[in-house]
Amino acid sequence: VKLRHFAQYGITSTIGMGGDGEDVLKIRDNQRHGDIKGARVFTVQHRFEFEKDAPTPDIARLKVEQLYKQGADAVKVVVDNRRNTQVKLRPEITAAVINEAHKRHMKVFAHIHDYDDAKLLMDQGIDMLAHQVRDREVDDAFINEMKAKKVAITSTLVRELSSFVYADSPAWLNDPFLIRFSDPARIELAKTQLKDQQSKLKDLALNRRDLEIASKNFTKMVNAGGVRIGLGTDSGPAPTRFEGFFEHLEMELMVKYGMTPMQVIQAFSKTNSEILGIDKDYGTLAKGKMADLVVLDKNPLDDILNTRTVSAVYIGGKQFE
């Protein structure tokens, strides 16, 4: 259902970055044989986050080998103490995961929150930061290392937005583009129950601060030039994040915080396919590549909101119905 939802909004590919289960591999394999009922799916299958996921470097290596044999598209590590409620994955574990994955030509993505964790993972050879640094502003040394090592980032600004925005009754809950494909009951829930819950959150101010710092860091990276910025949203797993619509909301924020519409288009197509290592077949208009296309009624270069004028979606050269 969610893959269909993504496709309705013109999102032709998505990657699951958590525990997806075996069924996703079946769906993906069916898609590769031409059975496309929604957005193309890629998956990390499982992620390394807690002690139990890999108590030793040797077990970490074995688990990466298992993921490789299962056919995972990438590997994911999580280094975050979740505001001092969890124990962080140890550096020797992340080093083993990254090393073993790279031996198998797999890319490694990281959930981070803090500057120091992101810096350590870059030193260890991480390929992509799946969120923006949110505990402090990044400095030139950080940005220079990103450029030198070609470390990519998806800032997932809507992820931060979703942690407080319903308290403010956002106008986009009445946007016809959201209403067009979304479950009315879910929208109603956002206007009532989620608004009530978020208004009472003890971490509300911290959540707002996370977006403030993330957006500043995003702007710094855009202005620095040469940082590989893709588009990611973390939409899908939470009721607070409307899959499909949130990708368009992320594009709006990316322009608000410094990108041109053309840079955003390149981020979600060319750069994202490079980050995933699938750019041989996807991501740009070129002979021999997959014809994944979105037809719009208005030009997004004039206004990024025009990405919301979706009139047709083609996946693998076939119109998605």
Image (cartoon, rainbow, N blue to C red):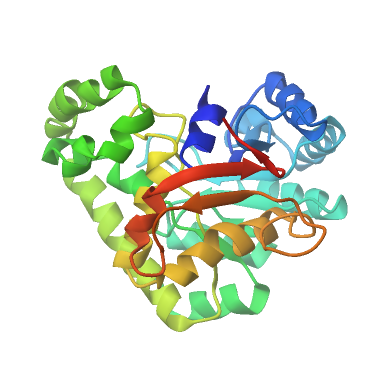
Residue appearing at x 68%, y 63% in the figure: 285
Of 189 and 125, nearer the camera is 189
Q: Quadrant of residue 320?
A: top right
Whether residue 137 appears in this view of the structure is no
Which quarter of the figure is the C terminus placed in? top right
Of 62 and 168, nearer the camera is 168
Q: Quadrant of residue 172?
A: top left
Q: Is residue 160 above or below residue 274?
A: above
The x and y percentages for residue 288 are: 82, 58
The x and y percentages for residue 43 are: 67, 36
As drawn, is 72 to the left or to the right of 151?
A: right
The x and y percentages for residue 276 are: 69, 53
Residue appearing at x 44%, y 62% in the figure: 115
As drawn, is 200 to the left or to the right of 92?
A: left
Q: Is residue 301 above or below residue 253?
A: below
Residue appearing at x 59%, y 77% in the figure: 147
Of 318 and 265, nearer the camera is 318
Residue appearing at x 41%, y 63% in the figure: 299
The x and y percentages for residue 4 are: 54, 28
Q: Is residue 54 above or below residue 129?
A: above
As drawn, is 124 to the left or to the right of 281?
A: left
Number of numbered discs on residues: 0
Whether residue 258 appears in this view of the structure is yes
Of 69 and 23, nearer the camera is 23
